[in-house]
Amino acid sequence: MRIVHVVPLMTPDGAFGGPVTVAVGQAQELARRGHDVQIVAGYSGFEEPPTDLDGVRLHAFKVARVLPRTGFAGLYSTGLLRHMFRAASRADVVHVHMARDLITAPAAAVAARSGARLVIQPHGMIDRSDRRLASFLDAVLVRRTMQSATCVLTLTETEADELANLHMTTKTRAIPNGIVAQPSGERRPRPRPEVLFLARLHPRKRVLAFARAAQTLAGDYPHVDFVVVGPDEGDGDELRALLEGPDRQPTVTFQGALPPQAARSRIAGASIYVLPSVGEVFPMTVLEALAAARPVVITHSNGLAPALNDARAAAVIGLDDDDLVTALRGLLDRPEAADEMGQRGQTHVMTNWSMSVVGDELESVYAGKVVDR
């Protein structure tokens, strides 16, 4: 099959986060299966964006901001939209990783008129919102395009119900984010134990909660490094002020952002991975930590929490700082138990959320095997 994947934005520091990682992983799996796959994306921050992603062609087009103070939603690319008219007309399937934005929503609308089978995957980004731009885009573009799709891929039944309640679509199919097994060489730990937060510094990710817990623990664990890695999306200044304040601990550090292709090995090299965020649906960084057999700490609001808690494959906590401190103490004081948790997590993720499972699901969807809810 000739397949086009569309993502909103690629940057050197991976600012758009998990949806891009998911799209690239899916495209690479499909290419390994013999399909003709390309990724179409907006880009910023590169002098020259890459043209090949491990065997998958990338057509990247520079974006410009056309709406101020609207984050990613206000970006637009004339070149991308022009390319989509050609690419969609030649494709069997156009798979759009769609948000309420001026890149993916127009690209999906073009695909809907092309004759190609349109598959939309919103990654939990299209939910109930009181923002005026969201309401406007829903009314003029998003709802109509979602309803024209052959299938909308959701991460959970809750996401599917939300889309139905918003009168977006009932043609949904649940599909997990997928992960590729890591070579054992990537799993070697660092010389010193490291507790790692790697995510965008957005308030929803709660990096400040991690930093406060790290400072509380640092005095009792001077042999452990507590590290923050990620691009600033709002909490950077407050994080720096906290780490440089009167309670500063030399083993608690902020190391800035990493290119997306380096994040996976960085997570694999940590001793413990922590993501104390709220409202996560299916975070790729947690899957990457699990695939590397790393113990992880997440909150009850994480979409992965029920399954991982049942499998005893993660420390699942509440939102209080004390909950995070207690969980980290338990893992640091009992390294053998932490390793066993990591092994259970690896077994669970590769059994249930491997990229081979996702590839089978995608081929089924692309072939039109979709059940209307």
Image: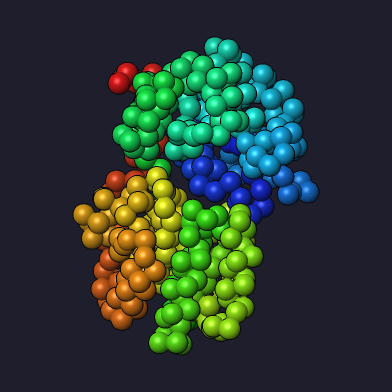
Q: In the rendered image, is residue 151 in sight? A: no
Can you say whether 45 is above or below 321 in the image? Answer: above
Foreground of the two, 229 or 93: 229
Residue 354 locus on image (x, y percent): 36, 46
* Left/right of residue 357 with respect to residue 134 in the rendered view: left
Q: Can residue 286 be seen in this view?
A: yes
Q: Position of residue 136 (x, y in %)?
A: 59, 24
Work out which quarter of the rendered image holds the C terminus and state it.
top left
Q: In this view, does 365 lie to the left or right of 81?
A: left
Residue 88, horizontal then vertical, whole percent: 60, 20
Work out which residue is located at the far right of the displayed protein and give it.
Answer: 47
In the image, taking residue 113 as reference, residue 11 lies left or right, namely right
Residue at (35% x, 71% y) in the render: 322
Q: In this view, does 144 lie above or below 356?
A: above
Which colour style is shown? rainbow
Q: Look at the picture and state if 213 lies above or below 296.
A: below
Task: Using residue 1 as the reference point, say whether residue 57 is left or right of it.
Answer: right
Q: Residue at x 54, y 48 (%)?
A: 17
What is the tally of numbered marks visible in this picture? 0
The residue under the point 48% across, 56% down is: 205
Provide residue 265's location: percent of width, then percent of height: 51, 62
Q: In which quarter of the image is residue 195?
A: bottom left
Residue at 37 percent across and 24 percent down: it is 164
Position of 116 relative to 355 (above/below): above
Rendered image quadrant of residue 82: top right
